Image (cartoon, rainbow, N blue to C red):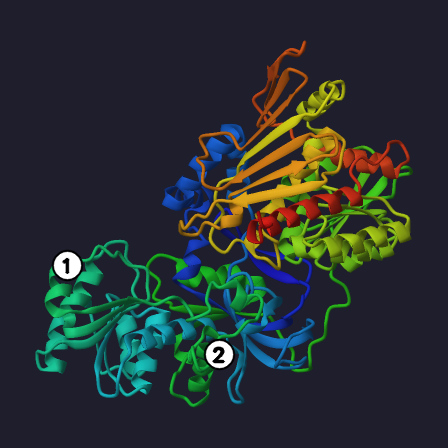
Amino acid sequence: MKQVLVKGGKVRIEEVPVPFASAGQALVRVSHSLISSGTESGFVSGGGTASFVLKKARNPLNIEKVKRKIASVGLRGTLEVVKSKLFEAQAPGYSSAGVIVECGSGLAGFRVGDRVACAGVGYASHAEYNVVPQQLLTPIPDGVSFEEAAYVALGAIAMQGVRQAQTTFGETIVVMGLGLVGQLAFQILRAAGCRVICSDPVQAKCDLAEELGAEAACAPAALPGAVNEWTGGHGADGVVICAASRDSAVTHSALDLCRPKGRVVVVGAVGLQLPREPMYMKELDFRLSCSYGPGRYHPAYEERGLDYPIGYVRWTEGRNMGEFLRMVAEKKVSVHPLTSIVRPVAQAQEAYSAILEKGSNAISSLIDYGLEEEAPAVPAERKLLVRATKAQAGQVGVAVIGAGGFASAFHLPNLAKMPEASLEAVVDVDGRKAKAAAEKHGARYCTSDYREVLADDRVKAVVVATRHNLHPVIAIEAARAGKHVFTEKPLAITVDECEQVCGAVQEAGVLLSVGFNRRFSKFSQHAKRVIDGWAGPKMILYRCNAGPLPAGHWTCDPVEGGGRIVGEGVHFFDLCCWLLGQDPVEVRADRADTHAENVESESNLTAILRYPDGSTATVVYCSLGHPGVSKEQVEIYGNDSVICIDNYCGIRFAGVGEKDYKQSAEHKGQFELIENWVRAIRGEAELSVTAQHGRRATWIAQEAMRKCYSPDPA
């Protein structure tokens, strides 16, 4: 399929695999998508790559991320990450309309053939096909065209701004900024029985507003006089700011325009340095409007389809979307006059240029994907050939399922440089990611459906690098298809799922390894050789200064990620067991009861493992620290000796006849681990990490969590 991508600030059209609809999602054949002049300017840079890089570099959030990365992995590692992120292809677009051609399991209220409008960055992209979750879909009413329905996301943004203003019939409301959202907002206000005064520095936009029914539309300088005239000197009942400005002058003007106890609602991106005096003297109500409405940016609502009961939240983002289209159907809101240009997808660059070039008065552009009148069909396959290659005798054909950050940084480049393996395919539900990774690392093809590689005879083994909840599902299917499996940690979130994977692997007679790479670090290997000669019990202290994750990160979700102890702590439990060569007989744990904002208690845990020979291992996992201190430290005590592994960059010995050494870069054994798996498949090595090791680590993690929340009585 054709998709519009932005790379280095420049628009391009590429062929990518058609996406795959998972549970609760629909595959939509797109008819039209909308380009708005505001939001999408963040993707595109008129000054080319250099201008785009400078724009990103000035962003304070990006500056802070770079500082933390330098403290964590050093300057060289940070430069590689920054370079990769800056020039990664982005998928713009967040408002479109089309026809459902495929329904994922559990999708409620929709069926194949339904005409739908779609919203959301990452979902309603500029592409011929999009996968959209249930809450970001809304039916298109009869009489509303695809072109009109493609405005749904912008309409919901405008509607939420109006709702935040809490207007009543007959009030006088000012709309500042007559871009696309402002033009829609004032029409919604007119339909609600308000008198509307509009303002914009561009006269053509004011003229358009008057044509669409605004009582008055003027330049910002004339706005105070117009408000005085229309309100008899009392001031406006409310102001809805739809403008975009870096300074706070627009906001200050809005405060001056309001009557006492009036309301100001900010929809656009403006400066918010607010003076106290006018707000205090008038006792103004100042609000910000969040995008489409309640539910926006909440994964439980948008991705997992958990709706708010209508009795408690009357207007969610989905209900705002539906109400906007109803207003369009009843001719209370007109969008056709707002369309500046319509271009086929092959001319998407022209559609972007029309609204983003300097001096342009265009408000919006539509991209037309040539949806034919007859019912569109699901594509025959989701595979895209990247390069033609012949199978090489003796090589293990491998497909990587999941082209996220870790797979792109380690598994894909490691497999590409391994002579014993051939990288056959890259799979990702996001077709652009799959294609970019396949091209970069020399895969034969890319696809969005992992079942394609399970049916491929040239693929002998798969690497599963998806989100944690999908590990056991794909591993079991792959084993039953006769494929060897390497799954990233954890093997599964629950012990029961781990046992199901172990059973499937044993029944199929295939090899499965788990991503416990720290065993293969040169420093771990050295420590293991030394302590194997020690007599008596040993003590291990493993400290992980993990740092915080962003609020709502999928790893912390109990369904998708299982939490950080299950998601990452398994690494450390496995290493301790491997170093001691035993399974623990007892797990004890406790957690810090922190009430800090966005800090989960389970991210600050101490677990103590007791082993049959009297050895113990203590794992301290902490998110409360500072990146100025290294992430991981392993201390091993026994036999009147101590070994310290410093963040897998060095090792120190005391009481041991070994020489300390260190290096600048981390060595965590990612290459050696996957090499061991490939060589074991070829019959050249014994598999080091097995499915049973994956089960053991998940069991320890679950036991530690259970002891934290349900401690044994004293």
Question: Among all residues in the image, which is located at the extreme top?
Answer: 657
Which type of secondary structure does the marked residue at label 2 adopt? loop
Q: Residues within 10 Å of mark 2 (few under 14, many from 20)?
A: few
> Hey, which quadrant is residue 443 in on the image?
top right
317 relative position to 18: left or right: left
Q: Nearer the viewer, residue 214 or 325?
A: 325
Q: Which amino acid does label 1 sit on?
A: Arg
Q: Residue furthest front?
A: 714
Left or right: 506 in relation to 367: right
* Amino acid type shown at disc 2: Pro
Residue beneath the point at 86% across and 56% down? 480
Q: Picture coordinates of residue 241 (x, y %)?
A: 27, 68
- Using residue 181 as the reference point, say whether residue 464 is left or right of it: right
Residue 322 in view of the camera: yes
Residue matched to label 1: 276
Query: Mark 2 highlights which residue?
Result: 309
293 above or below 63?
Answer: below
Find residue 433 and report its horizontal and vertical position in percent.
63, 52
Location of residue 675 by image quarter? top right
